[in-house]
Image: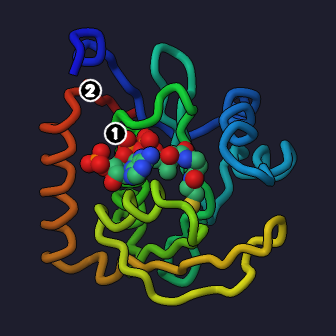
Amino acid sequence: MSAATRLRKVVIRHGRVSDLAAVMEIERASFPTPWSDAAMRRELECQENSYVLVAEVGDRPVGYVVTWVYSGEAHVLNVAVAPDERGQGLGELLMLSAIEEAISRRCRQVVLEYRVSNLAAANLYRKLGFVPAGLRPRYYLDTGEDAIFAILDKLQTPATRRFLSERRDAWQKEHDWTVSYE
Ligand SMILES: CC(C)(COP(=O)(O)OP(=O)(O)OC[C@H]1O[C@@H](n2cnc3c(N)ncnc32)[C@H](O)[C@@H]1OP(=O)(O)O)[C@@H](O)C(=O)NCCC(=O)NCCS
C-alpha cells in the first residue's frame, strides 16, 4: 500500500440531491443499462423506506449503495464505485455500512441480485457472508442474463453481528483508509 493511500480519508454519509451528477457519472461508467437521472434523484431525495450511502474522497463522491427496506428486509438495489477508485476496499466499506444500517433499522436479512458474469460482485458479496439462494432466469432485460439471488440472513443474531464486526476489523487492517461517518 502506498503512502498516498495510507493518508487518504473517506467519509461515509447519506446521499443528497446535490450528489446526483457525480453519482450518475459513476452509474453510467458502471452499468450497461444505467438508472435514469429521475430514478436516482428519487433515491437521493431521502425516502422513508430507502437509504443511499455515499463514499466521499476529497469532496468527490466515489461510490454509493442504494438500499430499500420493507417488511424487515433490506434489498440492496445498486452499488458501484468509480472505476479509478476500485480495488481499494471502498465497495466493501459501502456494503458493510449498508448492512450495519439495515441492522440498526431492525431488518432480519439483506438480499440482492447480481449478474452471473459479475465476478467482482460475487466475490464481494461472498466475502460479506451472502449465500446464493437461487437463480432468476433472464432477470436483466438488456442482455437477457440470469441473476443470482443472494441472502445474508439472521442479521440480528450474535453470530452474524460478530462475523460482521470481525469483517470490519479485518477490512481496517487490510486497507488503512481513515474512515469517518456523517
Ligand atoms: C463490485 C464493485 C462495487 C466492487 O467495488 P471495489 O471498491 O472495487 O471492491 P473492493 O476493493 O472493496 O473489493 C472487495 C472484494 O470484492 C471482490 N472484488 C472486487 N473487485 C474484484 C475484481 N475485479 N475481481 C474479482 N473480485 C473482486 C474481492 O473479493 C475483494 O476482496 P479482496 O480485495 O480481499 O480480494 C465495483 O467493482 C463496481 O463498481 N463494479 C461495477 C458496478 C457493479 O458491478 N456493481 C455490483 C452490481 S450487483
Residue 91 in sight here? no
Check disc 2 and give the amino acid type.
Trp
Residue 20 coordinates in the image, percent (x, y): 74, 33
- Left or right: 59, with 124 as reference point: right
Residue 138 coordinates in the image, percent (x, y): 74, 81
Q: Which residue is mark 1?
A: 89
Residue 3 coordinates in the image, percent (x, y): 21, 10
Q: Residue at x 43, y 55 (%)?
A: 98
Q: Secondary structure at mark 2?
A: loop
Q: Quadrant of the C terminus?
A: top left
Report if the beta carbon of the residue with label 1 is closer than 8 angstroms to ligand 1. yes
Tell me: residue 69, above or below residue 124.
Answer: below
Q: Nearer the viewer, mark 2 or mark 1?
A: 1
Considering only order in the chain, which callout, 1 or 2, is on the residue closer to the N terminus? 1
Q: Nearer the viewer, residue 15 or 5?
A: 5
Using the rendered view, name the quadrant where residue 164 is placed. bottom left
Using the rendered view, name the quadrant where residue 67 is placed. bottom right
- Spatial separation of the CA atoms under disc 2 and disc 1: 9 Å
Using the rendered view, name the quadrant where residue 153 is placed. bottom left
Q: Residue at x 56, y 20 (%)?
A: 60
Q: Which residue is mark 2?
A: 177
Q: Residue at x 76, y 28 (%)?
A: 21
